[in-house]
Amino acid sequence: MFDFSFGEIGLIAVVALLVLGPERLPRVARTAGALARRARNSWQSVRDEIERELQAEDLKRGIEEAKRAAADLQNDIRNTSAEMRSSVEQTAADVEAAATPTVISEPPPNPVQDSLGHEQR
């Protein structure tokens, strides 16, 4: 967060000792440490909350993409099913047309003859 060298920290400690004195310096140092720790924890909780929000957004985006993919797949399946149904119906019609018997002309009936051998109609 802040970039302090060892010399800068030492200079701050000497100035604080001169300004605050040896009696108050330990109490102020504990208070400053507690404030720094509280600030760091607050910052960490804000970062964690932001990360959770981002993860939730990513999850929502992923769900929406999955829903779109499922809808596209469903449409593809419906289209393929309709095409297959049409193809099967066409094939069935072709088979039915090919299986219809062709009428063969029958020979004329034999004339019936009576007992004397004469033809009767």
Image (cartoon, rainbow, N blue to C red):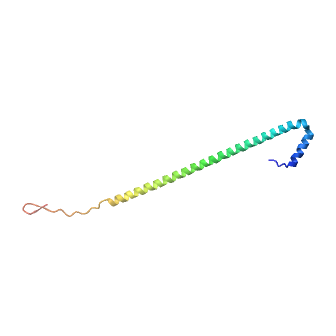
The answer to whether residue 92 is above or below residue 45 is below
The answer to whether 80 appears left or right of 8 in the picture is left
Asked where in the image residue 84 lies, by quadrant, the reply is: bottom left
Q: Residue at x 57, y 50 (%)?
A: 68
Q: Residue at x 46, y 54 (%)?
A: 82
Residue 18 in the image: state x and y as whole percent: 93, 40
Q: Residue at x 37, y 57 (%)?
A: 93
The answer to whether 105 appears left or right of 20 in the picture is left
The answer to whether 13 appears left or right of 83 in the picture is right
Residue nearest the observer in this picture, 121 or 63:
63
Give the total number of marks visible in the rendering.
0
The answer to whether 99 appears left or right of 67 in the picture is left
Residue nearest the observer in this picture, 81 or 104:
81
Q: The C terminus appears in which quarter of the rendering?
A: bottom left
Residue 80 in the image: state x and y as whole percent: 48, 55
Residue nearest the observer in this picture, 67 or 8:
8
